[in-house]
Amino acid sequence: MVDPDAPDVTILIPAKNEEDTIREVLERVLSVPLDKQVIVIEDGSSDRTASIVAAFGDEVTLIRNEVSRGKGAAIRRGLSYATGTVVVIQDADLEYFPEELPLLVEPILAGQHGVVYGTRFSQGFPKSMAWPNRLVNRLLVWAVRLLFGMGITDEATCYKALRRDLLDQMDLQCERFEFCPEVTAKAIRLGESIHEVPVRYEARTKAAGKKIRWTDAPEAFWTLLRYRSWRP
């Protein structure tokens, strides 16, 4: 049964040691013209991330992990609190532009698509992206085409929006950045086509707090392969 009081969209924001950016991210997310629930999953930060989020009061739901478990585990925990028809992921840095969130969720709310990704590569690779990241992203796209027969341009984008009922069917197991390939594989296995919309992107460096590492790449490819024959 559909809850008439439920928001249209739940925005999940996993965050670890993001005191430099989390305030601006939340201010911009809260300004987006959507009927929304905003959930921050603070993943064992050692800085002021949690206190900054807490200062937003009832506008933001704060969930705290005393010990860091990783982005995937944080998202899974946040999903247990999500009430929106659509769920979308927003990173706590400023690589993506929150003002573009409506572009992702509106096709789902309109009943046109069940899964929408924000592609960073509609105009080629962003100049700010390091060449190893470009290579891995290109290989992931090829892997999705090879393993699942679906052509997309950006498998590893943070900006993934899905109907919540689809996510509920996925029984997600991810702990870290394998959230992305697990969702991609399971969405396709659920019979969904992945619709892409162009989004802006400004990559940050490791020194600025970027957390994904080259060691996450093998896990991403293994996750796609692991769930190639998955059934709900």
Image: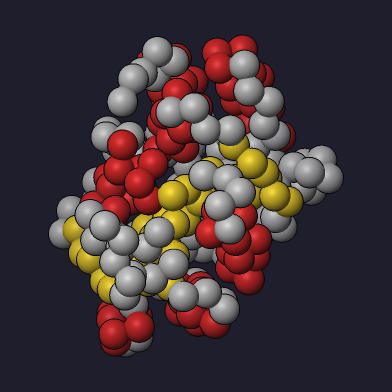
Residue 99 in which image quadrant: bottom right
Residue at the image point whose x is 56% and y is 17% from the top: 148
Residue found at the very far right of the displayed protein: 123
Q: Is residue 27 above or below residue 123?
A: below
Q: Give the left or right position of residue 224, taking residue 15 as reference.
A: right
Q: Is residue 156 above or below residue 33?
A: above
Q: Is residue 18 visible?
A: no
Residue found at the very far front of the displayed protein: 1
Q: Is residue 60 visible?
A: yes
Q: Residue 221's spot in the image, x, y percent?
A: 49, 20
Give the quadrant of the N terminus.
bottom left
Q: Is residue 157 above or below residue 16?
A: above
Of 111 and 100, nearer the camera is 111
Q: Is residue 110 above or below residue 230?
A: below
Q: Residue 171's spot in the image, x, y percent?
A: 27, 34
Q: Residue 54's spot in the image, x, y percent?
A: 28, 81
Of 181 and 117, nearer the camera is 117
Q: Residue 131's spot in the image, x, y percent?
A: 71, 34
Of 16 and 150, nearer the camera is 150
Give the quadrant of the C terminus.
top left
Q: Give the left or right position of residue 182, taking residue 201 as reference.
A: left
Residue at the image point whose x is 53% and y is 43% from the top: 115
Colour mapping used in the image: secondary structure
Residue at the image point whose x is 31% and y is 75% from the top: 5
Residue 96 in which image quadrant: bottom right
> How many numbered callouts?
0
Residue at the image point whose x is 52% and y is 44% from the top: 114
